[in-house]
Image: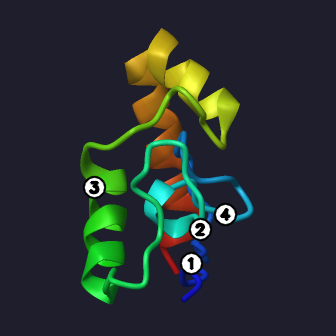
Amino acid sequence: MAPPSVKCLTKLWHPNISEEGDICLSLLRQNSIDGLGWAPTRRLKDVIWGLNSLFTDLLNFDDPLNIEAAELYLKDRDQFRNKVREYVSQFARR
């Protein structure tokens, strides 16, 4: 009945993912403001699709988990992309 616990194990630079790996995605919340939160009818594929959207096109700037990343994205996208590349080089390549 409760939403699954999802966490990023690789450190990322993303407006909706904290540097500790916590994820801000409404469907992973029991109660969400937008009405799209967890429900017992949801499936694992819904979580995967939601995470995919988070990494490709669904950025929430109204309630970012990583405020610094959100501000940088809005202020200077080139610098934001450079920071993302830096994190990938440093934390995702092992």
Residue situated in front as seen by the camera: 79 or 32: 32
Quick one: label 4 or label 2, which is nearer the N terminus? 4
Q: Residue furthest right?
A: 20
Which dot marks residue 30? 2
Q: Residue at x 47, y 70 (%)?
A: 38
Tell me which residue sits at (36%, 53%) in the image: 54
**Which of disc 3 and disc 1 is earlier in sequence?**
1
Front in this rendered view, residue 19 or 94: 19
User: Which residue is tagged 3?
Assistant: 53
| Alpha carbon separation for disc pair 3 and 2 | 19 Å
Please, what secondary structure does the residue beneath circle 4 have? Answer: loop
Instruction: Tell which of 43 and 86 is nearer to you.
Output: 43
Crowd band around label 4 with a 10 angstrom C-alpha radius: few (<14), some (14–19), many (20+): some
Verify CB contact (< 8 Å) between mark 3 and mark 2.
no
- Counting residues from the start of the chain, the first of labels 1 and 4 encountered is 1
- Which residue bears the numbered disc 1? 6
Q: Which mark is residue 22?
A: 4
